[in-house]
Image (cartoon, rainbow, N blue to C red):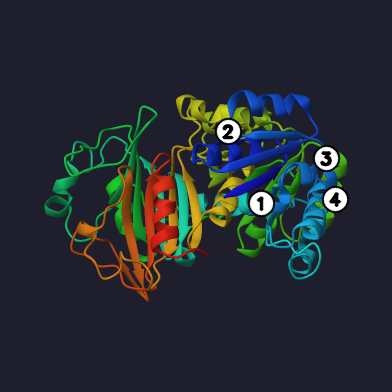
Amino acid sequence: MKIVIVGAGEVGFHIASRLSLENKDVVVVDTSDEALKRVSENLDVQVVKGSGSSPEVLIDAGVKKADIMLAVTDSDETNLVACLTCDILSPATKKLARIRLGDYDAYHEHFRTSAPHIDTIINPEIEVVKTIYRLMRVPGAVDVGEFEGGRVKIVGMRLEEGSPLDGLRLAEFSSRLGGVRPLIAAIVRKGQLIVPHGNDVLQLGDLVYFISEDTKLNDVLRFFNRRMKPVNRVLIVGGGLIGTRLADLLESKNIHTKIVERNPDRCRYLAERMNRAVVLCGDGSDQSLLLEENIKDMDFVVSLTDDEETNILVSLLARSVGADNTITKISRFSYMPLMASIGVEQVVSPRLSAINSILQHIRKGKVLSAMSVHGEQAEVIEAVALQTSDIVDTPISKVSFPRGALLICIIRDDEVIIPSGDSVIKPEDRVIIFATREAVPRIEKMLTVKLEFF
């Protein structure tokens, strides 16, 4: 597979990094010498200097032979023109574009059906708002992914003191916990990702990823000393694009919302735009303001300013004055491993949300969705098993899944099946597979060769 990536920023760099490790033919295009130097020194990919909107530059990058072109610069206009140019030069190349501005929302379908014929439009702001709302709905969750339209969830939850899972071997789950119990897909312990086996023992402080049907999630959460509860009051710090989109969503859910924004002009705009949300002009990192707004009564404090240091400070301040739940927007990937150590667990990243959206569209096989787990250490992939596959009508115990991969769920019509060795995949079943970064290429090969190429 040959992929041309227009834009060597954080999203472009990390997508290129992921794909280069999977031995794909990747070319990165950018106008910045510094960005290209970072790519060429750290990744085994080709680089081309120039604007991705230039026909000559795209030809030099090999777009005419590319299977996919990703336009992920920070400029919506550059991304649109790059796709238009690609459409002229190589109509068969699949085009994905990052489009952020809300002004374009109403035209997404037009961009798909007419020139520039963009196959997939990714809006990081929309995706990160969905992520925030999923985190709000699962108290204490560090990570939440949804499959089959939300019917099946994968949840990352920290194992805390008092949990009946502490010190329990996975092989003992059935005898000790009864019928409704978590299926453990992965464990993150001291920064290391573990694909669990029956003899593995859960420990305090583990970040445990488990899979559950949505209807049974509340029963599973009790093993982590958590329970579902309604979200009634939310404080948003930062009234930018993401803060505005989140406030719109919360208003539609009848959740009482306050927005703190320090820019007076933006405050006036928000006050005119919002129907019920209360807009406060002030500094969200001002402790006295947080106390005045009864921060202890808020179900969630969400820090969404354009400055990640401010977001971290707001979350720490909010926790110090009594807020139970905080969600923090972080853009720099280098910050993410540090967050848990300073007590900031619930972190969202527009760039990571964009990467997750892109992954599902560049994977081979009939992949319906893909989600990164614990940064870039692993992936959860949802795909369809087709009639042509030789893994259908075969017990799972006889299917040769690669080391580091785990089949965690089968969805058949309205039935959600937590698989055992005797389970059999049928044609048109949806399968959810957890795979470490090293196992993804082999899983992708299975999806291509055995599940048919789409």
Alpha-carbon neighbours of circle 3 within 10 Å: few (<14), some, or many (≥20)?
A: some
- Upstream in the sequence, badge 3 or badge 2? 3
Mark 3 and mark 4: Cα distance apart in space: 34 Å
Callout in the foreground (3, 2): 3
Mark 4 and mark 1: Cα distance apart in space: 43 Å
Q: Please state the horizontal and vertical placement of residue 90, each as a whole percent of the image.
A: 75, 58
- Upstream in the sequence, badge 2 or badge 4? 4
Q: Secondary structure at mark 2?
A: helix
Mark 3 and mark 2: Cα distance apart in space: 39 Å
Callout in the foreground (2, 1): 1
Alpha-carbon neighbours of circle 4 within 10 Å: few (<14), some, or many (≥20)?
A: few
Q: Amino acid at mark 1?
A: Ala
Give me the disc on residue 269. 4
Q: Which residue is mark 1?
A: 66
Is residue 237 something that shows in the picture? yes
Is residue 244 something that shows in the picture? no
Q: Please state the horizontal and vertical placement of residue 232, each as a whole percent of the image.
A: 55, 55
Residue in view at x 77 percent, y 55 percent: 86
User: Farthest bottom residue?
Assistant: 413
Mark 1 and mark 3: Cα distance apart in space: 17 Å
- Upstream in the sequence, badge 1 or badge 3? 3
- Upstream in the sequence, badge 2 or badge 1? 1
Q: Which residue is mark 2?
A: 315
Residue in view at x 19 percent, y 45 percent: 170
Q: Amino acid at mark 4?
A: Tyr
Alpha-carbon neighbours of circle 1 within 10 Å: few (<14), some, or many (≥20)?
A: many
User: Farthest right residue?
Assistant: 265
